[in-house]
Image (cartoon, rainbow, N blue to C red):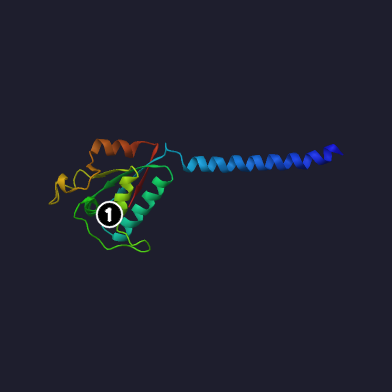
Amino acid sequence: MIRKILTPALISVLALSAGAALADSHKDKSKDPSREVLVILASESNQTQGMAMVLSNTMAGQGAKVNVLLCDKAGDLALKSYEAPALKPKDVTPGQMLRGLIKQGAAVNVCALYLPNSEHSQADLIEGVGVATPPDMASQMLNPKIRTFSF
């Protein structure tokens, strides 16, 4: 009789323990600070830029270390003089989202070709934005621990 009572109770305890362990493993994975991503943004489309920034901010919020490389017209997001239409539903621009991403600790750079091929200088970039070097970017792109996303 004791065996009949203990068996369902033991099964329930084991099931709850396994469920809690599975939940913990998912939670720990989503907050793992060792995850690192590289987001390469070259599109001049406002919506594409916005979605890249939404996803980058979301990844940063989930504990990922985010690196952003802005190339061609996307480099304009990093300019102090940047202006663009706000995107719904939050009524923010991709540039505003980029600034929020920098506040979360993201490393943001314009590509090495951006400034020499524009009318802008490094003084025109917002605080927190640097100029990428090909060896550093190639190193990130080749690093198997860093996932690369391109927009």
- The number of discs equals 1
96 vs 51, nearest the viewer: 96
- The quadrant holding residue 92 is bottom left
Which residue sits at x=41%, y=47%? 61
Is 5 rendered above or below residue 47? Answer: above
Spot occupied by residue 23 in the image (x, y as percentages of width and height):
57, 43
| Residue at 45% from the left image edge and 39% from the top image edge | 32
When asked about the image quadrant of residue 44, the answer is bottom left
| Residue farthest toward the right in the current orientation of the protein | 1
Rate crowding at label 1 as few (under 14), some (14 to 19) or many (20 or more) other CA atoms within 10 Å: many
Tell which of 3 and 46 is nearer to you.
Answer: 3
Q: Position of residue 24 (x, y in %)?
A: 56, 41
The answer to whether residue 26 is left or right of residue 146 is right
**Tag 1's secondary structure?**
helix
The residue type indicated by label 1 comes to Gly
110 sits left or right of 145 in the view: left
Residue placed under numbered mark 1 in the picture: 95
Q: Position of residue 101 (x, y in %)?
A: 33, 48
* Furthest residue toward left: 119
Residue 19 appears left or right of 98:
right
> Residue at the front extreme?
103
